[in-house]
Amino acid sequence: MLKKTLTVRPDVKVIVSNVDGDLRLTGWDREEISAKSGGDVLDLSFDGERVTVSCDDDLILNIPRSASAQVDNVDGDVDVRTLAGALIFGAVTGDLSLREAGSLTVSALDGDLAIRSCAGSVTATRVDGDVSIRDVVGSVTLDSVAEDLFARGVMGAIRARVEDDVVLHLEPKAGNAVDIVCEGDILLHMPANANATLTLTADDPEDIEVQVPAASVSGTNPLSVVLGDGSGSVISLVAEGDILVTSESKEWESAAEFDFGSNWPLPDDFSERINRRVQEATRRATQKAEAAARRVEAATRNIDRKAQARVNMRVGRWNWDLTPKGHVPPIEPVSDAERMTILKMLQEKKITSDEAEKLLSALEGGK
């Protein structure tokens, strides 16, 4: 494993330009940066203002807790813990888990987003999986979520566009607007004594239900709801499916399993586990390739059958016409050159082991 360290100031800016694997990013109390990777390339440089990191495999990166980080590209999963600085992510092809961090900005995430305890705001342009959020002090802006959204303990404003279902647990505060548009169902749980003004819109007005004591309801679709004196948050919910606004705990408990993120963050040794899985997969692939080569060699030694009346095979891009013309002469053994050609095609993955065996069999005159 490659390992590099740098001594830096606590508020340094860290730029991770590329990670060809998974990333674990952790804040610590040391005034230094530690980078570890199981790959062949690990670049760590400091120009006096910024630290730049890149690698060709998984990366375990420890940076000062108050540092800020910009991660341009990760071809895998990301796990972030105990960072107070701002975090900016470009493209992530896997999942992103964040626990105890400052503000977060994400441009493109192909997997799920799980956030536990964020001291700042959260902004995501595109998330192709689920989003699970707990305990965010600032605002939450989600421009596009391809699957479900679960949010609890968001103290700031919320704006989200969601393709599937939405489950929210809110304690509305004055000045914090909530604007949700989704193509599925919406479940909103609030305290019975909440102060808020709600506008609820569904494809069918009969799909809207309010289960909050002393709620003042007017209109049909949109349905206007005033909770308490209405001086708190202004909430707009638009759904193609059902909308349920409730203060009853049983409704919330029934949706508890919706939150995928309670145990979702990756384990401490996730990079080591991935490395072990890759090594095991490589070992199995090597064994299979060696077994295939042995089968081909066995076929070259054991084939002793008569030529068929017509043998015309297509393997990959090659068309092999092995039809005997006229009198069938005694079968000649496969030459070393022919055998090496076929083995080379197999090694270069231009043909499969089964195709190689069939080809050798045909050259020997078998089926």
Image (spheres, helix red, strand yellow):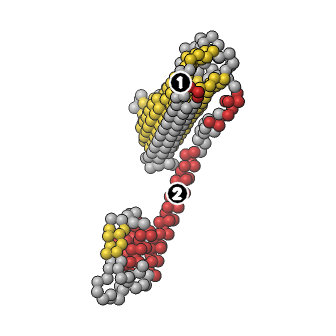
| Residue to which mark 1 is pinned | 201
Question: What's the residue at 42%, 28% (across, down)?
Answer: 49
Q: In this rendering, is residue 43 above or below 282?
A: above
- Front: mark 2 or 1: 1
Q: Amino acid at mark 2?
A: Ala
Closer to the camera, 348 or 62? Answer: 348
Quadrant the C terminus occupies:
bottom left
Distance between mark 2 and mark 1 Cα atoms: 51 Å
The image shows residue 317 at horizontal and vertical percentages of 33, 65
Q: Which disc, if any, is residue 230?
A: none
Closer to the camera, 186 or 307? Answer: 186
Q: Amino acid at mark 1?
A: Thr
Q: Quadrant of residue 221?
A: top right
Closer to the camera, 126 or 233? Answer: 233
Callout 2 secondary element: helix
Question: What's the residue at 63%, 39% (across, down)?
Answer: 263
Q: In this rendering, is residue 59 above or below 287?
A: above
The image shows residue 365 at horizontal and vertical percentages of 38, 82
| Residue to which mark 2 is pinned | 281
The image shows residue 257 at horizontal and vertical percentages of 65, 37
Q: Is residue 222 visible?
A: yes
- Mark 2, Cα crowd under 10 Å, few <14 / some 14-19 / many 20+, is few
The image shows residue 326 at horizontal and vertical percentages of 28, 86
